[in-house]
Image: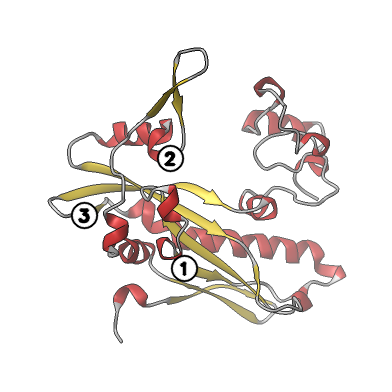
Amino acid sequence: MDIKHLLYLKTKILKYEDEEYFLYHRPIFEAIKELLSNIDIINHCQWNCSPDYITNENGHRECVYGEQWSGMLWENAQKSIGTGLKKVLSIILYSDATTLDHFGKSSEHPVYLSLGNIPNWRRNKQDAKVLLGILPKLKPLHNRKENKSEFASAKRMLYQYCFDIMTKPIYECDGLDIKTDNQIIWAFSFLSEFIGDLPEDASLTLTYSSSRSSHPCHICTVTIDELNNINLSQSQIELRTPNNMQVVINNNLCHEHWSE
């Protein structure tokens, strides 16, 4: 069957110690088209910024953020492209290494795609997400004591390059025409969210993920002892920025924050 949106590409990513590694993936907009070809999904999609308000216990009107389209990110994206039939298409990626057998001897690294335009209750159903690609993994036999640093560098490059290939069309595309029941809208696509566990997010942001790291979070500089403290105030959370990370480098504290 020659069905364009079901075809997968095979892209060579890296050759390491005479072993070639390939990324098996779909064109990202073909995956999006598959999602939106489901009538039940596109009928539930939200295309407009729509803040949600409640009255709090003090009797004041307060904005709540249950969906992406109720947040400032969506509002700013909408303002940047204008109004009318120009809409926002929010792309969500989810990645997590998955064990395929009970013995833990076989695993793969899939990447899934969904859309922030789909309500949470609908997005949690199986048909509201599609497989975008399978990431290659360096073979453990190449991870030897004498080339440990080189192996780690190749592993990071392999991971980053795969996502660069899969997401590059987002930044090269001028938009996507989407036909609904009664109109055709032009959708501006942007990568709004990446979902993963702490090790996955650390790999994506090149953050040192060892349990020995004093500051394991890839977003902020909270210590490992306070990482699960839900009572921290905003003033106690310092985000990682180029400026404060430069201070870390200057003070030779890299081993505590991200890198071996």
Q: Are marks 3 and 1 in contact (CB under 8 Å)?
A: no
Q: Residue furthest left?
A: 182
Q: Which residue is labeled 3 in the image?
A: 177
* Vertical arrangement, residue 246 with respect to residue 59, above or below: below
- Cα–Cα gap, marks 2 and 3: 23 Å
Label 2: which secondary element: loop
Q: Nearer the viewer, mark 2 or mark 3?
A: 2
Q: Please, what is the three-letter code of the amino acid marked with disc 1?
A: Leu
In the rendered structure, the answer to whether residue 147 lies left or right of residue 71 reads right
Q: Position of residue 86 (x, y in %)?
A: 22, 41
The one nearer the camera, 246 or 107, is 107
Residue at the image position 47 percent from the left and 56 percent from the top? 124
- Cα–Cα gap, marks 3 and 1: 22 Å
Earlier in the chain: of badge 3 and badge 1, it is 1
The one nearer the camera, 173 or 101, is 101
Label 1: which secondary element: strand
* Vertical arrangement, residue 224 with respect to residue 79, above or below: below
Q: Which residue is labeled 1 in the image?
A: 131
Residue at the image position 29 percent from the left and 60 percent from the top? 40
